[in-house]
Image: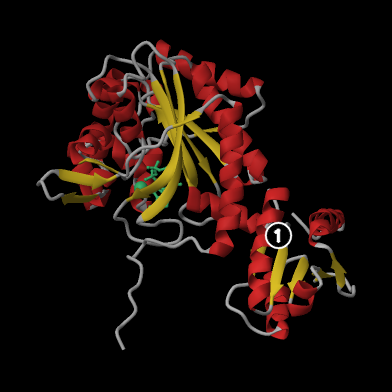
Amino acid sequence: MAKNIQAVRGMHDVLPEQTQSWQRVEKVFQQVLASYGYQEIRLPIVEKTELFNRSIGEVTDIVEKEMYTFNDRNGDSLTLRPEGTAGCLRAGIEHGLLHNQIQRLWYYGPMFRHERPQKGRYRQFYQLGVETYGMAGPDIDAEIIVLGHRLWTQLGIRDKLELQLNTLGSKEERQHYREKLVVYFSKHIASLDDDSRRRLQTNPLRILDSKNPEVQALVEQAPALMESLGDESLQHFKGLTQLLDEMGIDYKINCRLVRGLDYYGHTVFEWVTNDLGAQGTVCAGGRYDSLVEQLGARSSSAIGFAMGMERLMALVEMLDEESSPKRRSIDVFMICVGDKSRAVGMVLAETLRDQLPTLKLQVHCGGGSFKSQFKKADKSGAEVALIIGDDEVANSEVGVKSLRIQQDQNNMAPKEVGMYLEKALDIARRDGRSF
Ligand code: ATP
Ligand code: MG
C-alpha cells in the first residue's frame, strides 16, 4: 500500500475540535479591535523577496535563515511572508494610505518561517497583527498596549501575561550605543559563541537577544541602552509609562529587550508568560518610524504589534480545560428513515433554518435504521432529535425527542416544530446545557 502523505514538518492542522475555541477567540479580536476603531486589511501571503530583505534587515534570523523563498515561473524571487508588518506597510504606501493620514489597521493570517519546530514554534503559524500609521506621540504607543491588555482580559488570560517595556531611542543614539557595545563585547570575545561573534561585526545589538546562557550572562553586565539616550527619547518613554500608570497597566522595564528585527526604534514591548516554557513571548511590538522611509515613502510614524495565535491558544486552552465545558457543535439532529422521509426531512430542515437563523441543525445523511441513527444522534451531542419515518410522513407529523432529559417521543405538526425547538433550547440554556 502506498505510504500516507503527511503534512510538511512544522506545519500543523487546526482540527475541528480546536476550531471552536479559535473562532471564539477570533470573534473577541474583531470585537475589541472594532471598539478602538481599527479596520481590517487583507494582504497577500506571497510578496517580493526584496520587500523583506529591505525591511526586516539582512542580518536578522528571519532573513538570514528562516525565509521560504522561491523563484516563480517568471524567475521572480518571491517569499512566503514571515511576518505582516512589511506587507502591510507596502500596501499602505502602494494605495496612498499613509501620506498625511492616520491609519489604525489589523490583519490576521498565516506566516511562514523555516525554524526548528518545537512546542510553540512552527513553520506555519498564525499572527494577529496591529499596525498604526501617522501618529508620533506616546499616546498611540499606550493605546496599542491597552488594546492588548483588553484582549487578554476578555480572553481571561490577563493574569498569565507580563508586559515588558523598553526604548531603543533614535537611530543616532543606537549608533552611539552600538560603539559602546562593540568595545564591551570585544573585551569578552572569548566567551561569545560563533553567532554572537559574527553579530559583533554585523549587528551587535542582536547579541542582546541571544538565547545562549553564557552569552546572556555577559549581556547582563553590558552597558544599557537607556543610559545612552538623550532628552527627547527619554521624554517619549516617560510619556508612555505615565499613560500606562494612569490607566493602571502594570509593566516591567527590561533594558535587554531589543526585538529581533532591525526596523524598531523608541518604544518596544513584549507580553510574556511563564506558562509555556521557552517560547514565552505571546505578543511583541514596537515603533518603526524609520521603516516608512526605508520602503520609499515620505517619512511618517508607525507602531504596531504581532501576536502569535498558537501560543495564545495554548494559554486559552489551558484555561478552557480548567473551567468551561466544550460548546455543543449542533443543537438538533434529524433522523430520517425511508426514501420519502429524506425529502420531507430536508425540506423541513430548510424551513427551520429560515425560521431560526442561529439554530445548528444537522440532517442525517446516508440512511440506516432508527436504532443506528439514534445512536449517532446521541453521540452528536445535540439537545433534541427530530424523527421522520414512514409513519410520520403518512400522518404529516414530526417526532420530537429530547436526547438529554428523560422524555417520551412527542409527535407534532411540522409548523409547530420551530416554536417547540426554540423553547426546548431555551430551557437547555437555562439549565446550563448550552453555551
Ligand atoms: P521568538 O523570539 O520566539 O523567535 P520573534 O521575535 O521571532 O519570536 P516576532 O517576529 O516578534 O517573533 O513575532 C511575533 C509573535 O509571533 C511572537 O511573539 C510569537 O508569539 C509568534 N511567533 C513568532 N515566530 C513563531 C513561530 N515560529 N511559531 C509560532 N509562533 C511564532
Ligand atoms: Mg524568531
Q: Give the farthest residue toward the front.
A: 394
Image quarter for residue 421? bottom right
| Residue depicted at x 58% and y 25% | 36
Q: Give the farthest residue toward the left.
A: 75
> What percent of the width, then of the height, locates residue 51?
23, 35
SS for callout 1: helix
| Residue depicted at x 70% and y 69% | 334
> What percent of the width, then of the height, locates residue 8?
32, 65
Q: Which quarter shows the C terminus?
A: bottom right
Q: Give the farthest residue toward the right.
A: 407
How packed mark 1 is, by other alpha carbons closer than 10 Å (few <14, some 14-19, many 20 or more), is few
Left or right: residue 215 versus residue 202 is: right
Q: Which color scheme is applied?
A: secondary structure
Total numbered badges shown on the rendered structure: 1
Image quarter for residue 2? bottom left
- Which one is nearer the viewer's eye here, 165 or 4? 4
Query: Can the viewer see residue 340 in this picture?
Result: yes
Residue pointed to by mark 1:
322
Left or right: residue 316 versus residue 114 is: right
> What percent of the width, then of the height, locates residue 323?
73, 57
| Residue depicted at x 49% and y 23% | 141
Left or right: residue 209 versus residue 58 is: right
Query: Can the viewer see residue 274 in this picture?
Result: no
| Residue depicted at x 41% and y 56% | 121
Placement of 127 over or under 249, stated as above or below: below
Amino acid type for the residue under numbered disc 1: Glu
